[in-house]
Structures are given as structure tokens and as C-alpha cells.
Amino acid sequence: MSKLSRRELLQSAASAPALAQAAGGPLNLIHIGVDTWGTHHLGAYGHEFYKTPHADSLIAKSARFLDAYPQALPTIPARRAIYTGRQVFPSLLVAQPDDQVRIRGWHQMYVEDVTLSETLQAAGYTTAIVSDLYHQFKPGKNFTRGFDSWQWIRGQEADRLRTGNRAKIDLAAHMHRSQPSQKTKKAAGVFQYLLNRQDWKTEDDWLAAQVFDTAERWLKENAGENRPFYLHIESFSPHEFWDPPESFYRMYMKKDYNGPRLIHPPPITKNMTALEVEHAVAMYAGLVSFTDARIGRLLQAVERLGLMDDTVIVFMADHGTMMGEQGQLHKGETRLRAQCTNVPLAIRHPRENWAGRKIGGYVSHVDLAPTMLDVLGVKAPARMTGESLRPLIAGNAASTRGEAITGWGEHASIRTPEWNYIGRWSPGKPAFEELYDLKADPLELSNAAAANPAVCERFRKRLATYVEEGWAVTKGNFHAMLS
């Protein structure tokens, strides 16, 4: 990004408090971001198996979007779109050499990117992030740009927090018999996580608890004097490893089960017994409900601190997960079906009557940043390619977009009201293609690609066009980094 355009950003954002004042005074913003928690695992979206009363209550008081989909996946590409409001798929770049995962889009933030936090900081907001999403704190990732305060809760997944007595860790007690317990990268991640969590004693030690307790503490220390503020919360839970406190696991698992505690079960269920699958579902569901309970405690604190009347609250996820459909568990690059891609997006406005509004039509992660700036009365940087959703909410109208496109690595999904097409966009083998007839098969359980070659060809061409046009947006970033 040029110096001039960044100067223009700062100058335009500096007028934000006056703009907000005209609408009744500056509004605060709290963003509650969760990982691996799609609409298929929320009561508010019609899936009552999952006990999520606190998220449900917040969503009921909000404008909720029914057809929100990521622009890019997984973790870091999704955050890039959320933070910058800019299209990030397709991407030329893969992970940095020292990262564990080499997936397109997993690189650091571009120098010329302008984030929501930077824009609000320039407008006079006190900005803070509380997160246990360790990927964004890896060297060089710079996802903390624009935050006056950032707090990293350590210990998730393969975060190398601790070393110690390796003999104390029993991998076999936490992995399925079909999983090689010593040789895989994922087994090493399980081992590291178990090493990190070996001293946990109470529910307050769980990482979701630490995240939301730290966020509450930040509010207590700052809400009285550092206003307006933007508090961005990232809860890696209920992402794997699915390791809930026992009481929350028992909310779902009523049968006797004496096998390994499958905190990261196999990606396919064919080698699992029905009881083992039920156990895995209970482990995930228990972590969902535990995370929900901690969100509830945070919202109670917001109420006690008198912040509800002047604070916008956003609830959003990056993606969901397969939970036994088609014999699959977890997300995946070729699993771009609704269970993994339909994400919750709810926005509570303290001064607008948005409660109960259900907004249909396709919207995306890239729309969140421009929407928040619009709501707060701050001019969005020209670099943002997303659209403000405020007109849709105000008019209680559906988006008119005809498709939702989500990229992950070498693959992508094109979703329309009639079809969901999943294919490989990047040249290479093996080729992959799935097609779901959403009218006949709304749960996306039966691949209809073979029976609809003409439809697949049409989507193949559309995906190629989208990728080619996308380079005009994303190639410039890559060249600027090299210049």
C-alpha cells in the first residue's frame, strides 16, 4: 500500500467520532469469534441437539444471517478476510517455511493491507485482541496490527508451550486404535496438547475459560475510561482437540463408554464402532456447550458493566465441521459442504431494532469489516472489497448475490440456491469433483456429479473465470511484497 493511501485512510478515519456522535454518541464494538462452530451446531439455527442457550439468546437479540459463507478457508485465510474485508482467494502464497501447515493463503498479513483494527484505532478507538488462536501469533504473521493491547492465551493444539516428562503422556488413551500413534504430525500435535494441559485442575483452566475470563478482565480495566473501544475475542474452541470438561461431555454421552478419550478422532468413521462415533460427537458437542457457557459469563459481565446500551456485539465463526455425515468427521479441503461452510453471523445493535431479523441471501466474511465500520460511522478504506450489510438489515431484505464461492487450498466451492459444486481450481492431480442438488438433497449427502455432467462443466468454467478475475485483486499484493 502506498504512503499516500495510508495517509488518506488516517485522515478519513479521524473524523469518525464526529460522525458517530451525530447518531447518538460513539458505539463500542465487541467481536466474539469462534472456530469450528457452524450453523449446524447451534440451537438458534434449528439444531436443538446442541445446547447453546447463551449464543442462542445473543442471536435472538440480533440480526442473523442465514446464508453466510467464508471467502477462504481454513483458519488464517478466513481471519485475513474477516480482518481486512478484502478478497483473499485465489492466493499465490503458501505458508512460511517454518510453519507446520503449507496451505495457500496461510502467509503473513500483506504490508499494504488495512485492517479493521487499524481503521478504528486511527478513528480514536482503544483496540484490543484476546485470543488463543496460536497460528496468528506465529513469527511474522502480524495479525495483531492495529491493536493497542493483545493477549495470547497459550496452549492450544500444537502450540509449543511446554516440554517435560514425555513418559507421563499416554497417547494410546487419547487416540483411536486405527490411528498411528507415534509417527504422524497430528499425533505429535496431540502429544504437545496433552503436555500443555497436564496441570489443569478446574474448568477455569480450560482455554475457552481463560479467553473469556481475560476478555472480561480487559473490559473491567478499560470500559470505564477508554471509550469508544473495540474488543476482538478469538476462541479457538470448539476447534479440535475436542476435550471438554467431564460435566459437559456427560450432557451428551449417557451410555457407558470405556474406550480411549478421542480428542481427535479419525477423519472417517468406517473403522469406528457406533459407540465410538457417539462418543466423538459428545466430545465435540460438550466443547461447544462449554464454550457457550463461557460466552454467557462474558455477556453477563457486559451487562453488569453497563455496556449493553452502547455496544455492538458480533458473533461469528470461521467454519463448521462434519459430524458423521457421509461417514466423515472434521473439516477438509474437499469437504466444502454446508456442514463445514455455512457459518453463523449475528449482529446485535443497541440502538436499532434488529432483534429477530433473519436475513437470507449470500454474504461473506469479507463483508464484516465494512459492515462494522458503517455501523460505527467510520469510512471504510477503499482497499476493502466487501460490502456493508447494514442496508440489508435496515431493509430486512435478502442479499441479491447469486452465488457464494469459498476457496480452500487447491479446491473451491460454488454455491447457488440450486447447487453446490466442489472442484479443484488449481491444475494438478488428482482431480476432484462433487455436485449436490440442493433441492432434492438439502443435507448434501449424495454426490450427483456423474448424473449431471453439463452442470459440472458450467460450474467448472465459472470457477476458472472467478479465479482468473481474482488475480486482479490478489496478484498485486504478491508483487507489492516482492518490490
Image: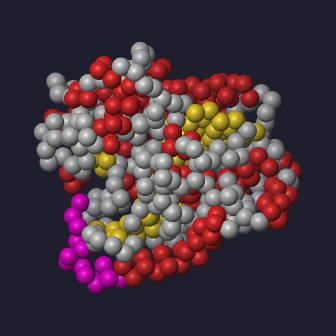
- Nearer to the camera, 116 or 398: 116
Identify the colour scheme used: secondary structure
Horizontal placement of 14 versus 311: left or right? right
Assign the C terminus to one quadrant of the image. bottom right
Position of residue 113 measured from the top left corner of the image (x, y, whole percent): 67, 59
Task: Say which quarter of the image contains residue 311.
Answer: top right
Is residue 347 shown above or below 244? below
Please give the range of residues in magenta.
445-458
Q: Is residue 386 magenta?
A: no
Position of residue 342 measured from the top left corner of the image (x, y, whole percent): 42, 56
Horizontal placement of 445 versus 88: left or right? left
At a point 72% along the width and 25% down the height, the residue shown is 221
Instruction: Count every numbered label the image shows and give the total.
Output: 0
- Nearer to the camera, 238 or 475: 475
Position of residue 117 measured from the top left corner of the image (x, y, whole percent): 69, 48
At a point 42% along the width and 47% down the height, the residue shown is 100
- Nearer to the camera, 12 or 62: 12
At a point 44% along the width and 64% down the height, the residue shown is 407
Q: Is residue 433 at all visible to an observer of this figure?
A: no
